[in-house]
Amino acid sequence: MAEVVIVGAGPTGATLALLLTRQGIPVTLIEAAKDFKRVFRGEGLMPSGLDALEQMDLSEVLNQIPTRPLTGWEFIIDQNQLFRVEEPMGADQPCTLVSQPPFLEALIAEAQRYTTFEFIQGIPVKDLRRRSPVEGEEIEHPQITGVTLADGREISAALVVGADGRNSIVRQRAGLQLVSQPNDINILWFKLPAHPRFIEDNVFCSILNAGSVFSIFHGAEAGKLHLAWVLSADDKIDRQNQDWAETFASLSPAWLATHFRGCANQVEPPIRLTVVVGRCPSWHQTGILLLGDAAHPMSPVRAQGINLALRDVIVAANYLVPQLKAEKSLDSVLPKIQAEREPEIIRAQHLQKQEARQGELLKSNGVLRSLLHQFAPLIRPAARYSWIKRQQQMRQGVTQVKLAI
C-alpha cells in the first residue's frame, strides 16, 4: 500500500498519523525537535476540538494527561468588571486546556502499537524529492515523491503532508505561497505562580487599562498562571529590565495586584511571540498537502489553531483513506480537502479579526473606555450578548465535520 510521510508531530501530524495507521496505511512521521517541550504550545481545546478528538476515539487520552477546564470568561476595564460569561456557553463541554507534550507523547505511543508506523524524531527535513521529468517533458511543478532528511536519508512517499506549523519547511520547499495578513501580532508570554482564586475558579480574564491589554488564566500545568501581554507597534519596552510585576499590578484589581507584587521574583522572563496570520491560496501540489498552521496560520485570538487543525485532519482522512487503500491517484481529492475546509478557515479568521479590532478600539480610545466604565451597569447586558454571539462559531465550528472512515 502507498506510504505517507507526515512532517511535523504536533497535534495535526500526530492525529493524522494515528488515523491513517489505524487503517493499515504505512506512515512515517518526522519531527525536527528532539522532544515536545517547547516554550510555548497552544493549549485551548474549544468544544469543536473536543468533538473532533471524540470522533477520533481519543477522548480517553485526555483523561490520562494534565488538563484544566475554563470556568468562564471575564473582561475588566480600568479595574472594574465589564461582564463575565460562564462556561460551557451552551456547548456540551467547556473550553479545556491541555498540556501538549504529554498529549503528543500519548498519541505517538498509541501509533507505535502498529507495525505500519515509523517515528523519526530529532532529524529535520532538508528538502523534498521530486520526480525527474522525462526528456522533452515540461512540468511547472514536478510530482513530489518524498523527502530528504538532514542526515542524508531519503524517504519515498505517495504523499507528503506538511503539518509543520506556520513556518513550514514543506511549504517553503514546495514553493506554495502564503498570503499573510498585514500587521503581525506580537505577544509577550509569561508564566507565574497561580493565585488560589484561579485554582478554584479558572476564569480567562482579559484586562484593559490605560491603553494596555493582557489576558491571564491558569494553564494545564499545575500551579502556573499564563499571562499574554499584547504589544502595540509603538510599544517601547525593555522586556529584560521592565518591572513586570509592578506593571501588571498597576493595571489590575486590588486582589490581583497584591498577588503580582507578592510573587514579583517568581515571574518568569517573557517569551516574545511574533504571530504571522494568513492563508495559502493552494494547499497542495501533486504529491503534497498542507494542513493546519502550515496551510492557514491562525491568530491566537480565542485559541482557534489546534481546533481547526484537528478538523482539517478529519476531512483529510475522509478523502485520503479510501484512495490510499485502493492505491488510486490522490490528485482528484487534494483539491476537495481544501475546498471543504476553506470556508470555515476564512470565516474563523474574519471573526478573529473582528475580535482583535474590538480590542484595539478599546485600547486606543480613552473616551470609549471611560464611557464603558461610567455606564457599565447599563451597557453590560448588551456587551455580554454581543460577545457571546461572536463566540459561537469560533467555539462550535462553522461547518459540519464528521469522521467517515
Image (cartoon, helix red, strand yellow):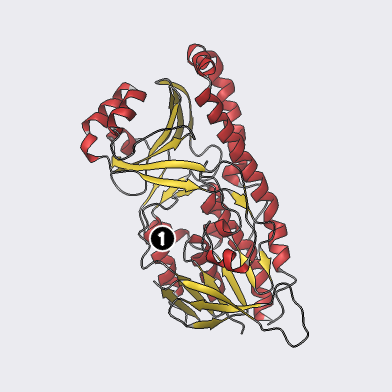
Circle 1: element type? helix
**Closer to the camera in the image, 179 or 369:** 179
User: Outermost residue toward the bottom?
Assistant: 135
Report the amino acid beneath label 1: Phe
The total number of labels drawn is 1
* Residue depicted at x 72% and y 69%: 333
In this rendering, the answer to whether 77 lies above or below 323 is above
In this rendering, the answer to whether 223 lies above or below 381 is below
| 183 left or right of 282 in image | left
Please identify the quarter of the rendering in which residue 156 is found: bottom right
The 10 Å Cα crowd at callout 1, few under 14, some 14 to 19, many 20 or more, is many
**Closer to the camera in the image, 158 or 67:** 158
Q: List the residue tagged with mark 1.
A: 103
Q: Is residue 206 visible?
A: no
User: Outermost residue toward the top?
Assistant: 374
Looking at the rendered image, the quarter that the C terminus falls into is bottom right
In this rendering, the answer to whether 50 lies above or below 240 is below
Residue 342: horizontal and vertical position, in percent?
68, 54
| 65 left or right of 375 in image | left
Q: Is residue 90 visible?
A: yes
* Residue depicted at x 49% and y 72%: 125
Looking at the rendered image, the quarter that the N terminus falls into is bottom right
Residue 112: horizontal and vertical position, in percent?
43, 76
| 111 left or right of 137 in image | left
Residue 148: horizontal and vertical position, in percent?
52, 78
In this rendering, the answer to whether 349 lies above or below 150 is above
Residue 205: horizontal and vertical position, in percent?
42, 32
